[in-house]
Amino acid sequence: MNKALYILIHPSDNVAVVLERVGKGEVLTLGTQKVTIREEIPAGHKVAIARIASGNNVIKYGYPIGHAVVDIEAGDWVNEKRIKTNLSGVENYTYSPSLSAPNIPQRNLTFNGYRRKNGLAGTRNEIWIVPTVGCVNGIASQLAETLRNETGLKGVDAIVAFPHSYGCSQLGEDHENTRKILRDMVLHPNAGGVLVVGLGCENNQLSAFKTFLGEYEPERVRFMECQKVGDEYEEGMKLLRELYEQAVTCQREPIPLSELKVGLKCGGSDGFSGITANPLLGVFSDFLTSQGGTTVLTEVPEMFGAETILMNRCVTPVLFDQTVRLINGFKEYYEANNQPVYENPSPGNKAGGISTLEEKSLGCTQKSGQSPVCGVVAYGDLIREKGLNLLSAPGNDLVAATALASSGCQLILFTTGRGTPFGCYVPTIKISTNSALYQSKPGWIDFNAGILLEGKTMEETNELFIDYIIRVASGEKVRMEKNGYHEFAIFKSGVTL
């Protein structure tokens, strides 16, 4: 086995990642050291390059990813059966700032987007039907289908209804979460027109929701309360036709890249996620923030084990304290529900080569690059600071992606080693960690970071990626849009009445 078939990520690591399936008896050469493979090891999985005694730490990315639960010999397959997490519950943290941003020249790039009257920029011009409550889901879906058939989508990018299960029988924080996410959707600049459809007797009353919205553009947002109109279908189509006539007048124009807000997300991760696709997003994040733009990292439970890296990149002690509350708040949420904080990775992650939550987190946080943390955003709130932000949301793909869109992101970058077809309510760009996935799922994947394992440098790949992101922001459709997948999900933690 030659050096091209494995990666040693950090000089202090005691495991390497094999790039192809290797068999018993093959030899791994690391400089002057030779390691004989003692059993078959799948691609993307870890092989011990030195003896790791039971109880000692397994090191990857230069950090512990857990401890061995059995003696592991050099050449052994290191998987979830031989390693256990070191994670525990709520911790005390100390601020030790480590602030350094890559020196990246200004390039004054633009994308062709939609400038809204409130000054915000969108990457799409779509018409959305947003129910205040699940009881009117059918009406919303029927209205969207009729308008699509009637217009043929001429002049707009999509016409979409967003059914959901909430808006009634909720209390406290759950009710507020629903109101926040729906508000954020209604005000999002990717929508050229929004029809808000209420029933009339729900907890999320339309009159109160209008007030909750704050300032909005009346020509871009209309309302219908079904119990107060004679024929909700006729009234809904009247309002939608008015919204459509206004939306088709909108035109793309050059907008500085500094106004782009991009969500960073991963799902269906594998052993290559922290080597190819996630580091690519990190390099892109550093580039975009250097140009005055904004990136947002979320999936708080998938920061556990790597959280101090992010904490020490906070630009102020106040942001450090907010990040500590972000991390410990999610740990307390787990404990309040009598669940361990380390109940991760998923079966698919393990099959792909990830053994512990620390390993997953150290790969996950690669998406944030090296830039300082400039903001911490609560669930359902809008981004206030340019640069790299941390957002409070769980790891669940659709819930986290929705939270990213609702924070103001116009695009979401989603890395995956296993593959997933879903799309959020903003363009959700799928980046494969390996070429095999890119080739096997052409209907799901938009960009292949697997080329980093095949000779492309990170600089070359990032230039290709920047060009692609600008094209998408300017209107080029991604796979989920071509497939007609537009979904969202609201975080729920309390009781249902």
Image: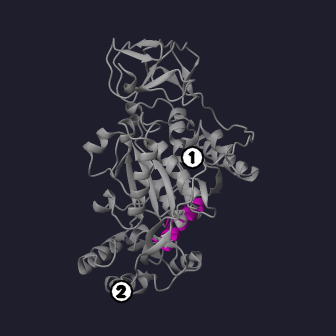
Can residue 493 be seen?
Answer: no
Specify the principal SS of the magenta part.
helix
Graded by Cα atoms within 10 Å as few (under 14), some (14 to 19) or many (20 or more), the crowding at tag 2 reads few
**Residue under circle 1?**
300
The answer to which image quadrant residue 424 occupies is bottom left
- Separation of residues labelled 1 and 2 (CA atoms): 42 Å
180 magenta-colored: yes
The answer to which image quadrant residue 38 occupies is top left
Identify which amino acid the numbered label 1 is placed on.
Val
Which residue is found at the position 26% from the left and 43% from the top? Answer: 439
Which residue is found at the position 39% from the left and 52% from the top? Answer: 464
**Labels 1, 2: front one:** 2
**Residue under circle 2?**
245
Q: Position of residue 289 (x, y in %)?
A: 57, 56
Q: Position of residue 440 (x, y in %)?
A: 25, 43
- On the rendered structure, is 77 left or right of 357? left
Which residue is found at the position 64% from the left and 62% from the top? Answer: 385
Identify which amino acid the numbered label 2 is placed on.
Glu
**Range of the magenta residues?**
168-190
Q: Nearer the viewer, residue 129 or 198?
A: 129
431 magenta-colored: no
- On the rendered structure, is 10 left or right of 477? right
Does dot 2 land on a helix, a strand or a loop?
A: helix
Q: Nearer the viewer, residue 435 or 424?
A: 435
